[in-house]
Amino acid sequence: MTALHVVVRPRPDSAPSPALASLHGVLDVVVEGVNITARVGEGQALDFLMDLAFATLTAVSSTRKRATVPLHSGNEAWEIGLECDGEDLLLSVFCPGPVPSVATHARRVPTRLFQAALLKALERASKGSGVLPTPVRLGLKTATDALIALRMPTRCPRVERRDVRIEHRVGDLRLEATVPLRVTSGAASASDLERADLLSLLAEGQLRLGIGKATRYVGQSQLFLDVERLVALADCTVESWRSARPTFRRVQLGCGRLGLRRGPGEAPIELTVVSTGATARTRTHRIECDQFAALVLGFADRVADAICECDPEQNRNLRLCNLRQRSAQLRDQLQSIGDDESVANPRPDSYRRFVPKLRRAVGIWETGPKMRFMPRWVASVPQIDLRATFLCGDQLMVGGAQETACLRRSTGEMIWKRSTRPAACVVTPAGLVRIEPDGQLRCHRLDDGEVRFNLSVTPRSAGSVAGSVISGPGMPMLLALVEGQRHVTGIDLVSGAVRWRHTAKRGGSYRLRRAGRLLLVSGGDPLLVALDAVSGEVVWSLRTRLPLTGDVSVDHDSAFTISGSPGGRARVHRFNPWSGAADWEVELDERPVAGRAPLLTPNVVIVPTTEQEGCGAVAYDRTSGEKLWEQAPGLVGHTAAWLAVDDCLVVNSASGVLMGLDAADGRVRFQHVFSCSTDADQPRRLEPVLRSGALFVPQQQVHVMRPRDGELLGTLPSDLIPDLIRVDERCDVYVAEESGHLAAFGAAPRLAVVR
């Protein structure tokens, strides 16, 4: 049999048209009697033959002496690699995807026999395929002529290889390898091209894993591919430690198998090495996750350095650059393990004085008769944006997909209207700030809608815009905004200039919570940082064991936050917002509701929880962290809004159930079930609004109740679905429906007995 044998089986029935039937078929490439390729499938068989011919020319005549041909088989993308080595060609077949595999590596075939077999295959394809389209016929002729021209004596230089020994040790573990690496003379070329070239990284050597004094021989190994698997395993290990959840993984390394098992909490790693050769043995070793990750990362760096030292061209290999980048990111996470970055504020009183002194005011509707409402006006704003609708004094700002309008809240009269694009909006003392998805920030005056200033900020790649408005006695008017993944910027709302910018050590989905003059920055990272809102300096920092969710609640001298990660356990933390000192932390048995900060009453902190059955709640004593009561998930549905009012927890669910729980013992104080015909009639936002002692609850209609005992005070006479409600200081209600309709209702005068 010849060195190369091509089998083409026509499939005319599967061709797109009868004219192209001769181009389609199933193709196999057989080298020395061994099928080294997956079948091309019902694809362009003749195109593949031409690509293989041109790749042979490139491998023999170019300076790189290497070439690859894509080979698509079903849902897989394979490649055939050719490398010229003296009078021979080295054939490799591999899948370069995220989970790479190598079918054949460096199979030696004489170049003359390979060219002759390929010429014969091209000749048979040209004569046996019937009438061919002109471009295909010309391509076959060009490939054939080029291969014939190579019949002159041609001899490529031998591929120089160097046996390199690589070793890295951490504690009782060590990784070592002996591998022949390709050596190229001279420095890297000046080309700016970067490409993912797995063929240049394939090198078969021997890999060994040492545990204590014993050495486990893994066997013949594609070193670079095994290093990629080890880095992915180390990444899984570090993520398991950061989220405090168990994990179990097994990977195939050469002729051996490496298993990794870790329990929940702070459990170490159980590393199992299984040799699958004739003398199969199993050995288990316990090691900390940071030591295992350090071992893998150190070994990966040594392998990458050795490859680039032998072949400087690999510095621009995207596959190798990706490995270095993954190792660097994992090393950043690894450096934070065990580091205590907590720094306390020695002068907490200097920031405590900026806390506003709030007094409990008695609302006029906490006692007394029922409430009545009278319609005032109706307006229409096309494609209304509920997140861009605000009450601003005597004005009602309404955002839409194509315009932003300002209405007079008493009459519904249009004050001004401006053409705008969809954006995240926030009302500030200086005007309406709009942040568009491309990072363009504009501040509009409230009286006429004119733009006060423009600014370009870095948009966030994921998540919504996060920020906080700073204003008050002794403080300038600022907008603190999260930019990108690592920056928090303070923007002066008067001049429109950037006053300061804080850069976090690590990237995350940061969110801001204002506490007086402090900005609490957290989310996606175990470090919570308090910034001075005026200067941007770090006042204190607090490090937790698990990544923080960014949900923070502040009340006087105590603050509460939640840490955890998806799939793992979560914890509730109490700390002092002025000094940064940690008070206590407790572990939750259930998962907390995402995006919901802890709810605070005078003596209790309540955390809504969720499972497959629905939502529940768990309560702790604010002073000691002692668990007081728990309502298991399933109390209400998954879609619900939570609000703490005095000593009562109010839950408004999409199923039409309104419930009030006593914060002291968790018992049901009151419950209402409202009519719920279809899901389409449910409001988009279920958050109740507390005003003047009355609670405005959005359901299919807006119901007004007294939160102390659940007594119904009235119902809004509106046909609109209350997707959004706003209530002013006079208890006038403004209802917005997502369809674009607005309606205003005024509270009727309250009747009182005069003695």
Image (cartoon, rainbow, N blue to C red):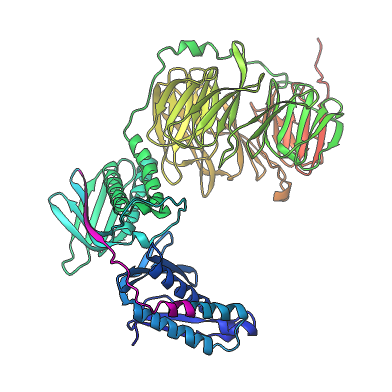
Task: State which region is magenta.
Answer: 144-170
Residue in the picture at 41% in, 65% down: 62
Question: Observer-nearest residue: 78 or 567?
Answer: 78
Question: Observer-nearest residue: 639 or 264?
Answer: 264
Q: Taking the image as drawn, is residue 397 in sight?
A: yes
Position in image of residue 363 (x %, y %): 69, 19
Residue in the picture at 30% in, 55% down: 185
Rendered position, 736 above or below 391: below
Residue in the picture at 51% in, 29% down: 552
Rendered position, 177 above or below 341: below
Q: Is residue 492 magenta?
A: no
Quadrant where the C terminus is found in the figure = top right
Q: Quadrant of residue 731?
A: top right
Q: Quadrant of residue 150?
A: bottom left
Q: Residue furthest left?
A: 213
In screen coordinates, is 655 left or right of 394? left
Question: Observer-nearest residue: 96 or 670?
Answer: 96
Q: Is residue 166 magenta?
A: yes
Q: Quadrant of residue 703?
A: top right
Position in image of residue 75 (x %, y %): 49, 69
Q: Taking the image as drawn, is residue 665 in sight?
A: no
Rendered position, 82 above or below 516: below
Rendered position, 73 above or below 245: below
Position in image of residue 639 (x %, y %): 61, 44
